[in-house]
Image (tube, rainbow, N blue to C red):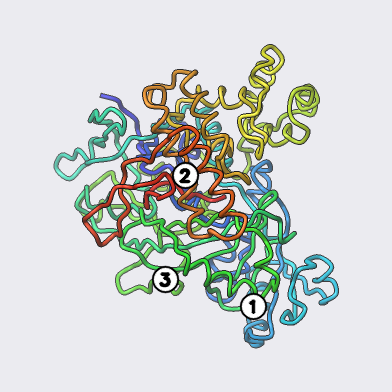
Amino acid sequence: MEKATVVVIGGGATGLGILRDLSMRGVKALLVEKNDLVNGASSRYHGLLHSGGRYAVKDQEAARECIIENQIMRKIGKSCVEPCGGMFTRLDIDDEAYEELWVKGCADSGIEATPITLDEAFKLEPRLSRKHVKSAYLVPDAAVDGFRMAWQLIDSSKRYGGQVKTYTEVIGFDTVNGELRGVKVRNQFTGEEYEIGCDIAVNAAGGWAGFVGKLANVEIGVQPDKGTLIAFNQRIVNHVVNRLHKSSDGDIFVPHGSITILGTSSMSVPDPEDTSTSREEVESLLKIGEETFEDLRDFRILRTFAGSRPLYIPPGGAVGRSASRGFAIVDHEQDGLKGLFTIVGGKFTTYRLMAEKMCNQICAKLNNSTPCRTAEEPLVEEVSQADKDRAKKFFPSYGTNLAATRLGVERFKKVVERLENDPESRELVCECENVTRAEVEEICKDDTSFIVNDVRRRTRIGMGTCQGNFCALRAAAVFADMGVESTAKDSLTRMKEFLQGRWKGIRPVLLGRTIRETEMTRAIYELSMAVRSLEVGVRSYNDTKSTPNSSLLIPNSKTGGESQ
């Protein structure tokens, strides 16, 4: 039987942060995730590294946590963070009295909110509505890449002995006389069921925490809260732009590289797997967004996506936007099960703090007095300029820095060596994101790469303008050539899964050029190569019946849809 001192359940930002923290304190820790990493809310969000400004009136404790963790993340995760800054703008339809409360709340929370003139605001953000914007403030918001940060957390954890098993679902717990002895799991590909022995298990499953709790016969107050977002294929804003009013739908624009994300909505759902989106949701977000940017509909929409926030709901607590964005730690010894903890709620920005608080309690149980160091030590070493200069001979014009931040020092060196020695490895698998065959081959060798979608999340293939038109086929071919077992046996199905995930986010935004490009996708795969659809069903979450897809361009409602 495999053994670890602590088993962490859930491969989102919080679970990965716990794995890193425990590993750095010398605790033997293993993380299990039922799908790929950051498959839930940690990738299906707007990518905002909060300054805390959004919580300055309603929840000053959360606001103070955000500004502190914002500063820490800028230090330890430089290659994951774009320090673009933020701007809060009050429109003529917003409550002027709220502005006064917000300014005071920022000051009380330690958030620097600098007032600027309208002329300065329009100079910094030329597309802002001159008709509606009445005041503006600068705050230290930033954008953060959740995918990239996840892999860096893993690399940091592994340096200290941490282990990760993806596509490993928890199906039960082994307990004796009210004390945890192990976690029962199932391999998603082989169906093999086995047990991992442990002294402590941490339920960090986010929106799925309630389902994991039921396996141990404990109740956990978590409410999945779905939020829908829109990704535009242009950089509409230079800063993170927030509406200066009580938090609501469609009131934040976040720049990410060459795109912009508009979000988000808030809808309580019974199932965290519900990441469906609709044309009605898109229209609602656009209508609200164009109050800040009047020409919003002139910009091409790349896709839409959704994720479920794991809101902590104590007995009698509020739900939806009224629910706290704080987090809770539960020691289930109080429920009669010694050795099981649950951590739920919180935000991506505060993942490190959540992990630190959780690990402090775990280490107290283990009599481990090693202090937390996650706020001081960088996630990864930065690639040197000398290595980047060497790589520029082989990478596309602007691909060097992109690859360096995605891959980290060791993988980057291996990819550059491959590019030097094998000219064929220089071909681009994805032109939109400048991903070479050498990079895909290197990622294929990772012990968490099983299917084509896994390499997408690590390299961003399929996330650019063409949304997988060309790179889906190429990536599947590389996986088959590399002999990745779960893909090589059925590379066609894995390619279809890749395309289904892309289509899911495109279908609700079929307008203008997007329709033409979708027809090109259909021509390439259905007409030219006779690639038909996956035999998967589309169904509502209240319906037990399923209708097989009749076309490649009909999505599985539970497939794909992460950020960007």
Neighbourhood count class around disc 2 (C-alpha, 10 Å): few under 14, some 14–19, many 20 upward: many
Q: Which residue does the numbered mark 1 point to in the structure image?
A: 102
Label 2 secondary element? loop
- For the residues labelled 3 and 2, the Cα–Cα distance comes to 22 Å
Neighbourhood count class around disc 1 (C-alpha, 10 Å): few under 14, some 14–19, many 20 upward: many
Q: Is residue 56 left or right of residue 537?
A: right
For discs 2 and 1, the disc positioned in front in the rendered view: 2
At 28% from the left and 27% from the top, the residue drawn is 190
Residue 96 shows in the view: yes
Residue 110 shows in the view: no
Q: Which mark is residue 38?
A: 2
Q: Which residue does the numbered mark 3 point to in the structure image?
A: 320
Q: Image quarter for residue 87?
A: bottom right
Question: Are the residues tagged 3 and 2 within 8 Å (C-beta)?
Answer: no
The answer to whether 449 is drawn above or below residue 330 in the figure is above
Furthest-top residue in view? 421
At 58% from the left and 66% from the top, the residue drawn is 63
- The kind of residue on which mark 3 rests is Gly
- For the residues labelled 2 and 1, the Cα–Cα distance comes to 33 Å
- The kind of residue on which mark 1 rests is Trp
- The kind of residue on which mark 2 rests is Val
Residue 502 in the image: state x and y as whole percent: 49, 46
Viewer-proximal residue among 502 and 11:
502
Q: Image quarter for residue 291?
A: bottom right
